[in-house]
């Protein structure tokens, strides 16, 4: 079996000695080039897990290994895109991306750094806006600059915390398309938090479903069996889409709470199930998937 590019083993997080863990026994792996989304209710620790992967926060227990090395702090090998674009307002679009590039490769001359920056600015559809300041950009354009900046340093893994959450539906769709295009061209490994079920189905190869906190865990790993060539316009016509979507919604509405209730009654942390609902027959109306 191929060794995982990213291996997360037994991760847990306590914020106080006498408080229950936010999450515990979190283990999963990513292969190089995979796009993985994680979904769960607020309070289950999704952002904390992302921060641990980024090296921005320490776990209370467990270990994260990326490309054979333990993650112990921030590194330019891991690019992060937050819901807030976090652009420097005194720099132009080009200046913001060049700043990141020169942080990664300080020995590069200015013209080489600009060439690298322009390449990814064009990839996100902002060619012609290089000299605009953030105050002159729409929300969607600002977020695209953030994505260009993250990709321009060519990280081994990209971490995204609800990067499109503040965008309107039309802008969100455009930026999703740009992200898919860049990931297809760069074969980037991505770990992304989202609350949008349809977004996860469009973007992800695998979807991690977290139970409710405290004591949250990754209850299921859903394999997206839809073709990689899926688009926002076409995926709704595939019967697999509705099987996967119904499975995800059922988990969020019913099974995540059932797992939490069972753990409160003393049940053991469930072993992560690997499921392929897109290949399974559709459930009868009102029926729930097996826990």
Image: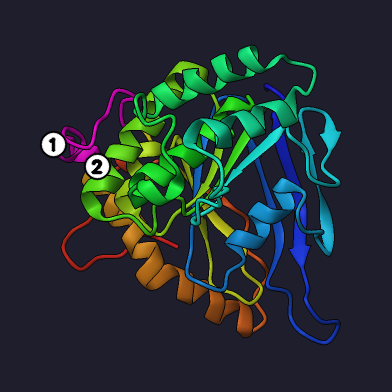
Q: Secondary structure at mark 1?
A: helix
| 49 left or right, relative to 55 | left
| Residues tagged 1 and 2 counted as in contact (Cβ below 8 A) | yes
Decide: is 191 above or below 259: above
Q: What residue sits 43% from the left and 45% below the top? A: 143
Q: Nearer the viewer, residue 191 or 108?
A: 108
Q: What residue sits 16% from the left and 35% below the top? A: 233
Please tell me how crowded label 1 is: few (under 14), some (14-19), or many (20+) other residues with Cα within 10 Å. few
In the picture, residue 123 is in which quadrant?
top left
Quadrant (top left/top right/bottom left/bottom right) for the N terminus: top right
Q: Which mark is residue 163?
A: none
Please tell me how crowded label 2 is: few (under 14), some (14-19), or many (20+) other residues with Cα within 10 Å. many
Question: In this view of the protein, can residue 52 be seen by the observer?
Answer: yes
In the picture, residue 261 is in which quadrant?
bottom right
Q: Nearer the viewer, residue 251 or 119?
A: 119
Q: In 3D space, how far apart are the residues under numbered discs 1 and 2 (Cα atoms)?
A: 8 Å
Can you give x and y, in whole percent of width and height, for residue 181 in the image?
37, 24
Q: What residue sits 47% from the left and 69% below the top? A: 41
Q: Secondary structure at mark 2?
A: helix
Residues rendered magenta in the picture = 226-240
Q: Residue furthest left?
A: 237
| 222 left or right, relative to 77 | left
Quadrant (top left/top right/bottom left/bottom right) for the C terminus: bottom left
Q: Which residue corresponds to mark 2?
A: 241
Q: Which residue corresponds to mark 1?
A: 237
Can you give x and y, in whole percent of width and height, for residue 195 in the image?
40, 59
Can you give x and y, in whole percent of width and height, for residue 171 in the image?
26, 46
Look at the image and say whether residue 142 sits in the magenta stretch.
no
Which secondary structure type mostly characterizes the magenta part of the structure? loop
Q: What residue sits 27% from the left and 38% below the top? A: 174
């Amino acid at each position: 079996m191929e060794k995982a590019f990213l291996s997360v083993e037994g991760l847990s997080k306590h914020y106080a000695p006498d408080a229950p863990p936010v999450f515990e026994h979190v283990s999963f792996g990513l292969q190089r080039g995979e796009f993985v989304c994680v979904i769960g209710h607020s309070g289950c620790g999704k952002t904390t897990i992302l921060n641990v992967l980024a090296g921005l926060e320490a776990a209370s227990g467990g270990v994260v290994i990326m490309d054979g090395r333990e993650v112990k702090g921030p590194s330019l090998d891991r690019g992060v895109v937050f819901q807030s674009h976090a652009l420097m307002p005194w720099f132009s679009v080009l200046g913001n991306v060049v700043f990141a590039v020169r942080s990664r490769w300080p020995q590069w001359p200015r013209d080489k750094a600009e060439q690298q920056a322009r390449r990814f600015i064009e990839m996100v559809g902002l060619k012609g806006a290089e000299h605009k300041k953030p105050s002159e950009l729409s929300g969607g354009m600002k977020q695209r600059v953030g994505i260009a900046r993250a990709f321009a340093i060519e990280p081994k893994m990209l971490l995204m915390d609800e990067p499109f959450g503040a965008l309107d539906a039309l802008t969100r769709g455009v930026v999703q398309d740009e992200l898919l295009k860049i990931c297809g061209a760069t074969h980037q490994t991505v770990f992304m938090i989202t609350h949008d079920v349809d977004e996860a189905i469009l973007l992800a190869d695998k979807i991690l479903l977290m139970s409710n906190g405290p004591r949250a865990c990754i209850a299921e790993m859903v394999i997206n069996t839809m073709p990689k060539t899926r688009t926002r316009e076409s995926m709704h016509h595939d019967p697999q889409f509705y099987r996967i979507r119904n499975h995800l919604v059922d988990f969020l509405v019913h099974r995540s709470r059932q797992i939490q209730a069972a753990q409160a009654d003393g049940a053991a942390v469930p072993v992560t199930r690997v499921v392929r609902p897109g290949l399974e027959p559709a459930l009868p109306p009102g029926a729930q998937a097996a826990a």
